[in-house]
Amino acid sequence: MPGPKDLDPSTSPRALLGAELRHARDQAGLTQDELGRPLFVSGSYIGQMEAGTRRILREHAVRLDELLGTDSFFTRNCEVSNKSRYPDHFAEAAEAEATATTIREYAPLLVPGLLQTEAYARAVFRAYQPTATEDVIDELVEARLDRARLLSHPTKPQLWVVLDEAVLRRKVGGAAVMAEALEHVAVLARRHRIIVQVLPFAAGAHASLNGALKLMSFTDAPPLAYLEVLATGQLQDDPATVARYELSYDLVRASAHAPESSLALIASVAEDYAHEDQQP
């Protein structure tokens, strides 16, 4: 069948490319599972590409054009749809985050990116890249603050965060930066824009000791789990794997303080930092 026109990169290319994939698959009379087999991916992975929550990699694009007879359409356009201002290991997760209806996150060490203030983000990036130029740090901070604009919508996405107590106690950027960062989290919680809990040190061993965990749900695509360590990350879509991480998150949440007492603790620690900053 004739290939559609090239995508306009100014109009949500990932979503447009996914819609074209769904149309081409329907025209070919294939299910998501049937199309996924020759690509060695699951049907849910195809569904996520169609929904725009996962990028279409070039090697997949080439094979899709062969299977669907789309005259190199996906090969030509996958590069445009995959352009990102985020590091390669995080690009897919950030783009999926932007279309998620619910985000649940356990943060063991740092305030999550969606909740960071400018000063906090700057301190984090400077620690990651101590010799980077100010222009590089400025660009990273700007990208992180742009992500946080997701929360400008009054209700979507629903964000539920569990902060390890270490997040509150680790003095990133100094007392003034921490006071502002924690007060920002507290303000969002008071406005009922987010749900936040604190996992206390007293909880001891817990189900996510191995590290950070982010879970994302979508209206028209299967859920995803994202795991991140130093300079690398993994986006998981296997249903059994995602279910296992969902259980881990639920167990962590069950061990944490209730939202009301968590908010009181966050506000109290923020006030302590503010007083510390004011001391001569």
Image (spheres, rainbow, N blue to C red):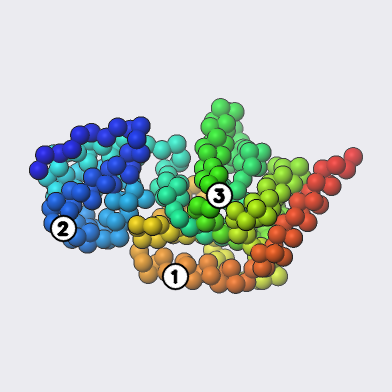
Q: What element carries label 1?
A: helix
Residue at position x 57%, y 31% from top?
138
From this viewpoint, is residue 89 visible?
no
For mark 1, what is the residue?
Answer: 244
Point out the frontmost of discs 3 and 2: 3
For mark 2, what is the residue?
Answer: 30
Point out the frontmost of discs 3 and 1: 3
Residue at position x 42%, y 69% from top?
243
Report how far apart the C-alphas of labels 2 and 1 lie in the structure: 30 Å
The tag earlier along the polypeptide, 3 or 1, is 3
What kind of residue is marked 1?
A: Arg
Residue at position x 72%, y 65% from top?
261
Query: Marks 3 and 2: CB-CB under 8 Å?
Result: no
Report how far apart the C-alphas of labels 3 and 1 lie in the structure: 30 Å
- Where does residue 254 sit, x and y in percent of width and height? 60, 72
From this viewpoint, is residue 275 visible?
yes
Q: Is mark 3 on a helix, strand or loop?
A: loop
Query: Marks 3 and 1: CB-CB under 8 Å?
Result: no
Name the outermost residue toward the left: 1
What kind of residue is marked 3?
A: Pro
Report how far apart the C-alphas of labels 3 and 2 lie in the structure: 39 Å
The tag earlier along the polypeptide, 2 or 1, is 2
- Where does residue 73 sit, x and y in percent of width and height? 19, 38
For mark 3, what is the residue?
Answer: 154
- Where does residue 150 sit, x and y in percent of width and height? 51, 45
